[in-house]
Image (cartoon, rainbow, N blue to C red):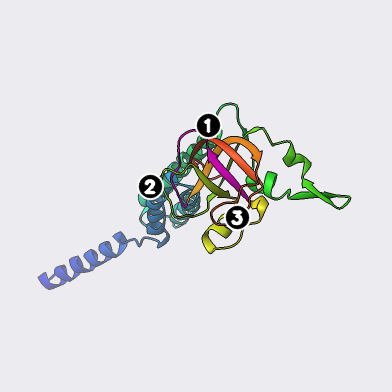
Amino acid sequence: MSVSAVNDQFVAQDLQTNEFDYRPMPVIVPVSMALGVLSASALLGVVGILIGLIGVGVGISAVVTIQRGEGMYSGSWAAWIGMLLSLTFAIVGISSQVYAFQTEVPEGYRRVSFSQDISAKGFSVVEGQSSLHPEVAELVGQKIFLKGYMYPQRQTEDLIEFLLLKDTGECCFGGQPSPTDMILIQMKKGTADYSQGRMAVAGTLALTRDTTPEGLEPVYALEAIHCERSRSAF
């Protein structure tokens, strides 16, 4: 066999070997890795947890795709890493939210939903007379814990009094909250600083006829001893 023929044979073998060794990586694999990294935001809140859960699903899909390829695809280790990162961060994020929810209510206080237990009840009308809803009336004088959003005002620090709204609809878009959609928070212990985030407040619920500097007339007041950014998203 001539030298030229031998060289051609080796070249052909090299081409076959290189062609055999090359295995493409499915696009879903780097997506899984990216979601695994982004799922670290699960430590900060619910959005991150959702990213983590999506990442778990994408990671599983990537692993299955590679396994079904029977050696056709590469990137198995990357798919596993992406899935495990998403799973780990999702579990840690959920656990931290559950722990925060279980421990954020001060001892001796009852958790109440501002929207469902107070605002949604509104007033009762009996024989043409308007009065507090019976279930809300039972809360007056009780130690409660609830969450809402601070109504913006000129002063932003060391507040001893501010309005707490059930949602961001009025405080962010300049709407006029109804009397039962706001609570006048009167700090009886410490002060509070303005925040756009959800606030958690604990105190004794009372009725009020006070008018705020903005001309708003809330029905309820809360003699608060505790006010901070909500630890949980719920």
- 188 vs 33, left or right, is right
Q: From mark 1 to mark 2, how far is it between C-alphas?
A: 33 Å
Marks 3,1: beta carbons within 8 A: no
Please state the horizontal and vertical placement of residue 134, each as a whole percent of the image: 78, 41
Task: Look at label 3 and name its amino acid.
Answer: Leu
Where is 100 relative to 155, above or below?
A: above
Q: Does the magenta segment cover residue 184?
A: yes
Q: Which residue is under mark 1?
A: 103
x, y percentage for residue 67?
45, 52
Residue count near mark 2 (Cα–Cα under 10 Å), binned few <14, some 14–19, many ≥20: some
Q: Is residue 71 visible?
A: no
Quarter of the image containing the C terminus? top right
Q: Which residues are magenta?
A: 182-196
Q: Which residue is mark 3?
A: 216
Residue in the foreground of this view, choosing between 113 and 223? 223
What amino acid is labelled 2 in the image? Ile
Per the model, the C-alpha gap separating discs 3 and 2 is: 55 Å
Mark 1 vs mark 2, foreground winner is 1
Give the Cα distance between marks 3 and 1.
34 Å
Q: Which residue is mark 2?
A: 81
Q: Nearer the viewer, mark 3 or mark 1?
A: 3
Task: Point out the tag, 3 or 1, that comes first from the N-terminus.
Answer: 1
